[in-house]
Amino acid sequence: MKNPSSSNLRPGEIRWPKRVATTAEAVRFLNAVGFCLLFPLENLPLPSLYFACARREPTGWDRYCLLIWKWKDELGRRRLAFYSKYFKGRGTFISLRLLPHFLALESSAYGPHDYDRAYAAGRISADACTLWQALAEHGPLATLELRHACKFDTTAGNRRFKKAALQLSRLLLVFHSGAEQETDSWASNRFELTARAFPAAIAAARKIFAPEARRVLVAKYLEWHPNAGPRTLVRLFHL
């Protein structure tokens, strides 16, 4: 599909026919583009939900930020889309149809209790293994609950927690399954295992070889960005 007037947009953005204004419209947008960022990111040529909603670049924390922040929590809680810190460790939506292909691309089609196997294979750190095990044993947990379960309550422990959580997120092993108000400040992320929440995606990913997964994802990207060059494809899809 051609991206109209793309020369006037930040690289990667899509001029969607109408402003995305509801949860249902956000899901339609995500399903159409296949994968996108929550907010635009410099030097990462991907569409963003913010631009689809605001139809401009962000200039500060505005009503569109609040809206897509709410959708991030709602879509994950209702399993309408997959949200994790994937591309460059930044907030990324992936459509449920393409989730198996991303899992295959990252060789991340593990079962809920495969943390020891992933650690033995060198895929995850010891701290990431601890987080995964806690989620496997206790179910979905909000940030402070998960830190406490892993005994990462100190300041140093929080740094270890953030690094381990980001590693699991970038491998798509955990995802954002909503939010929970643990303090008077911002609501906390609620972590859940991808394998437990999306078993069908895991099963499908095990039947897809990485080269085929990459071919499908590149084709989806080129559908909206037909002029993308080889360097862009290499950066996004590990070519």
Image (tube, grey):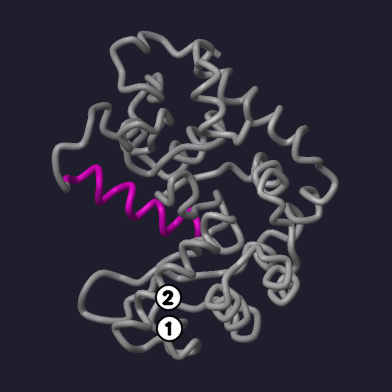
Residue at 68% across, 43% down: 105
Q: Amino acid at mark 1?
A: Arg
Q: Nearer the viewer, mark 2 or mark 1?
A: 2
- Quarter location, residue 41: top left
Tell me: 129 left or right of 9: right
Q: Quadrant of the C terminus?
A: top right
When the figure is inspected, residue 133 is found, relative to residue 20, above or below; the finding is below
When the figure is inspected, residue 13 is found, relative to residue 24, above or below; the finding is above
User: Which element carries disc 2, helix, strand or loop?
Assistant: helix
Residue at 71% across, 27% down: 215
The magenta span reads 62-77
> Is 184 a magenta residue?
no
Give the main secondary structure of the magenta stretch.
helix
Pointer 2 and pointer 1: residues touching (CB < 8 Å)? Answer: yes
Say which residue label 1 marks. Answer: 147
Tell me: 195 left or right of 31: right
User: Which element carries disc 1, helix, strand or loop?
Assistant: helix
Residue 79 rendering spot, x and y as whole percentages: 57, 56
Find the distance from the CA under tag 2 to the CA under tag 1. 7 Å
Q: Which mark is residue 161?
A: 2
Which residue is nearer to you in this view: 52 or 156? 156
Residue 29 rendering spot, x and y as whole percentages: 48, 33
Q: Residues within 10 Å of mark 2 (few under 14, many from 20)?
A: many
Residue 203 rendering spot, x and y as whole percentages: 81, 55
Tell me: 235 left or right of 133: left
